Image (spheres, rainbow, N blue to C red):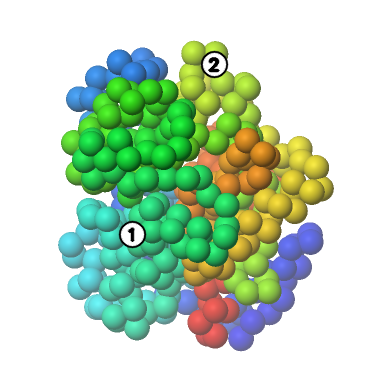
């Protein structure tokens, strides 16, 4: 069924004489959703009423991305688009595709990323990416950190605050980072998220609880370099793509050293000159091996499949700490946009369509088609 095709140093497994019926599940940003480039960079004086309007749909994809993934899959297979809304179950049950390429972030709830995989498991339909359990754990940053800590994988000290008063239980020192426990794509993380005293801490915890209806994750601030690592494949064929560094020394002087919502969606646009990414990162051999080892351990311990992107930052001793796991990584197709997974793939000589096909092929092989 499979034929090995050599593309430079990369090997693709491509079906011959068989076109699979692939469903692409997704969530699309509403047409009304815009990212306000003229919104000022906001520090601790941030007006909370802007927040929900600005970042509500940050995790969802644009039609540009959805169509790019569809086009990549259609080079080999038949593709049907299925939006991950309340009608998705019935559509998937009726269509019964051979496999689903899942990029859906979900509609609501702490387990929203798990909805489509859970439906597909129930319908016994194969799909790309991690299963419902892994997606749920990775979105809940505190649960992910508990597992990492158990396996002695470095991650920043943390406390989960259900009430502003819980901030008084902190046993580690300032500065601290405050973020929603179950969000992605920079949601809820602003310049004000870096706090330096108890007053700021309580204010940020209140902001998270009130605006996101969930506990606030309080973490020690890691002062070192930050990296993001894209991973493809499963088992012995798992491959780490060139490591990306976010160079905070190149941030504007009045912006705190966080890849916050402001940095990700206001500063970092097609129109703005915001070249703060270095790929491949300049690393000593020792640090590179540390990052790769920690990344692979994390990928395997959390049960990630086919692909993921893992973010790390160095602590005061230069040790790589895991700060976030992204089993549904962002994949904006335009090279002018700083989408990390495609950026790392291009650095490895893998073009966008090939990258998408590699993810699908990893899933096909995992399911023993």
Front-most of 161 and 50?
Answer: 161
Q: Which mark is residue 38?
A: none
C-alpha span from label 2 to label 1: 34 Å
Q: Are marks 2 and 1 in contact (CB under 8 Å)?
A: no
Give the crowd class for mark 2: few <14, some 14-19, many >=20 residues within 10 Å: few
Q: Secondary structure at mark 2?
A: loop
Judged left or right of residue 336, residue 141 is left
Return the x and y of residue 269 as percentages of the image width and height.
47, 28
Q: Is residue 120 above or below residue 35?
A: below
Q: Which mark is residue 113?
A: 1
Return the x and y of residue 365 as percentages of the image width and height.
57, 79
| Residue drawn at the location 37% of the way across and 45% of the way down | 159
**Residue 355 shows in this picture:** no
Q: Secondary structure at mark 1?
A: helix
Return the x and y of residue 126 as percentages of the image width and height.
42, 78
Judged left or right of residue 170, residue 344 is right
- Name the image quarter holding the N terminus: bottom right
Front-most of 266 and 95?
Answer: 266
Q: Quadrant of residue 43?
A: top left
| Residue drawn at the location 53% of the way across and 49% of the way down | 155
Judged left or right of residue 104, residue 304 is right
Q: Which mark is residue 252?
A: 2
**Residue 200 shows in this picture:** yes
Q: Quadrant of residue 143?
A: bottom left
């Amino acid at each position: 069924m499979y034929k090995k095709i050599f593309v430079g140093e990369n090997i693709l497994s491509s079906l011959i004489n068989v076109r699979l019926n692939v469903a692409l599940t997704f969530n699309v940003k509403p047409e009304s959703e815009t990212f306000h480039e003229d919104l000022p960079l906001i520090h601790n004086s941030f007006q909370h009423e802007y927040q929900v309007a600005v970042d509500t749909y940050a995790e969802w994809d644009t039609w540009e991305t959805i169509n790019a993934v569809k086009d990549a899959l259609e080079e080999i297979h038949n593709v049907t688009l299925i939006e991950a809304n309340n009608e998705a179950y019935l559509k998937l049950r009726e269509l019964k595709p051979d496999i689903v390429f899942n990029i859906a972030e979900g509609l609501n709830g702490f387990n929203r990323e798990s909805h489509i995989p859970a439906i597909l498991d129930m319908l016994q339909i194969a799909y790309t990416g991690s299963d419902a359990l892994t997606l749920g754990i990775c979105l809940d940053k505190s649960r992910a950190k508990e597992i990492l800590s158990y396996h002695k994988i470095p991650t920043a000290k943390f406390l989960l605050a259900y009430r502003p008063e819980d901030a008084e239980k902190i046993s580690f020192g300032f500065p601290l980072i405050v973020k929603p426990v179950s969000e992605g794509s920079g949601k809820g993380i602003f310049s004000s998220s870096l706090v330096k005293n108890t007053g700021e801490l309580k204010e940020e915890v209140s902001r998270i609880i009130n605006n996101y209806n969930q506990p606030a994750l309080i973490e020690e601030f890691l002062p070192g370099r930050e990296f993001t690592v894209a991973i493809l494949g499963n088992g012995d064929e798992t491959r780490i793509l060139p490591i990306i560094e976010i160079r905070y020394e190149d941030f504007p002087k009045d912006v705190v050293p966080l890849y916050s919502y402001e940095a990700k969606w206001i500063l970092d646009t097609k129109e703005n000159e915001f070249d703060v990414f270095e790929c491949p990162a300049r690393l000593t051999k020792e640090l590179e091996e540390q990052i790769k080892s920690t990344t692979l351990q994390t990928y395997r311990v959390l049960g990630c499949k086919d692909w993921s992107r893992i973010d790390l930052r160095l602590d005061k001793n230069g040790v790589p700490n895991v700060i976030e796991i992204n089993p549904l990584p962002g994949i904006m197709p335009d090279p002018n946009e700083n989408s990390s997974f495609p950026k790392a793939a291009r650095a490895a000589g893998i073009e966008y369509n090939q990258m998408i096909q590699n993810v699908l092929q990893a899933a096909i092989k995992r399911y023993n088609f």
